[in-house]
Amino acid sequence: MSNIEQTLSIIKPDAIERNLQDKIKNEFKNNGFEIAKEKKIHISKQEAEQFYKVHETKPFYNDLCNYLSSGPIIVMALQKNNAVLDNRKLMGATNPKEAEEGTLRKKYGISIDKNSVHGSDSLDNAKIELEFFFKS
Ligand code: CMP
C-alpha cells in the first residue's frame, strides 16, 4: 500500500562547513527520497529557539540553538513512502557514537551536537516543522 509522506530534513552547519551537502543529498536520493523542496538559509538564534521549542527545558537547549544558528543550513522536504520513519532509520541514533554502521550520523556526524542532520520524529511534527520552514 502506498503511504507517501513528507518529512523535514536539515543538513546542519557542521556538514555544510565540511562541504558534505551533495554527498548527503545523494544518500537521500539513493535511498528513494525525492527532494520536493529545498533551500539554503542562515537562521537567527530566535528562529532556532522557536524551531527547537520542544527542547526548551533541556540543559542542552541554549547550546543547541546557538549551534543551529551558527552557520548556513539546508532545509528540505523529503518525500517517499513512509518518509518519516525511513529518514530516521537512514540518519541513525542521535549520538553518532551510538549510530549503526552505514547511517548518516555514523558516517558524517562528529558529536551529539554536531550530528550533521536533523529529521522530524513523527508525522505530526513533520507537518509542523515543514510549515515552519516552508510556510504555504
Ligand atoms: P536533533 O535531531 O536535531 O534534535 C535535537 C538535537 O539536540 C539533537 O539532534 C542533538 O544534536 C542535540 N542534542 C544535544 N544534546 C542532546 C542530548 N543529550 N540528547 C538529545 N539530543 C541532544
Image (cartoon, rainbow, N blue to C red):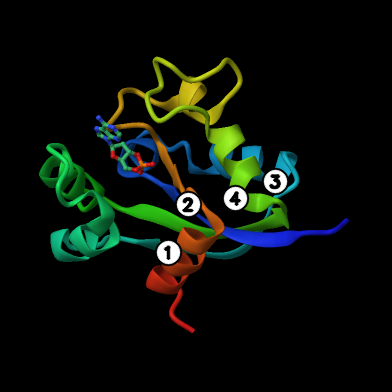
- Disc 3 is placed on an element classified as helix
Tell which tag, 3 or 1, sits nearer the viewer: 1
Query: Callout 1: few (<14), some (14-19), or many (20+) C-alpha neighbours within 10 Å?
Result: many
Q: Do the residues labelled 4 and 3 touch (CB within 8 Å)?
A: no
**Image point 16% across, 37% down: which residue?**
60
**Earlier residue among tags 3 and 1:** 3
Do callouts 2 and 1 mark residues in contact (Cβ within 8 Å)?
yes
CB within 8 Å, label 1 to label 4: no
Amino acid carrying label 2: it is: Ser
Q: Residue at point 59% right, 43% down?
A: 87
In the image: residue 122, left or right of residue 118: right
**Which of marks 1 and 2 precedes in the sequence?**
2
> Residue pushed farthest bottom?
136
Please give left or right for residue 100 compared with residue 63 in the image: right
Q: Mark 1 points at which residue?
A: 129
> x, y percentage for residue 125?
46, 60
What residue is pinned by disc 2? 120
Left or right for 136, reference 110: right
Q: Distance between the residues labelled 3 and 1?
A: 21 Å
Mark 1 CB lies closer than 8 A to ligand 1: no
Task: Place residue 74 in its image quadrant.
Answer: bottom left
Instruction: Label 2: state its secondary structure.
Output: loop
**SS for dot 4:** helix
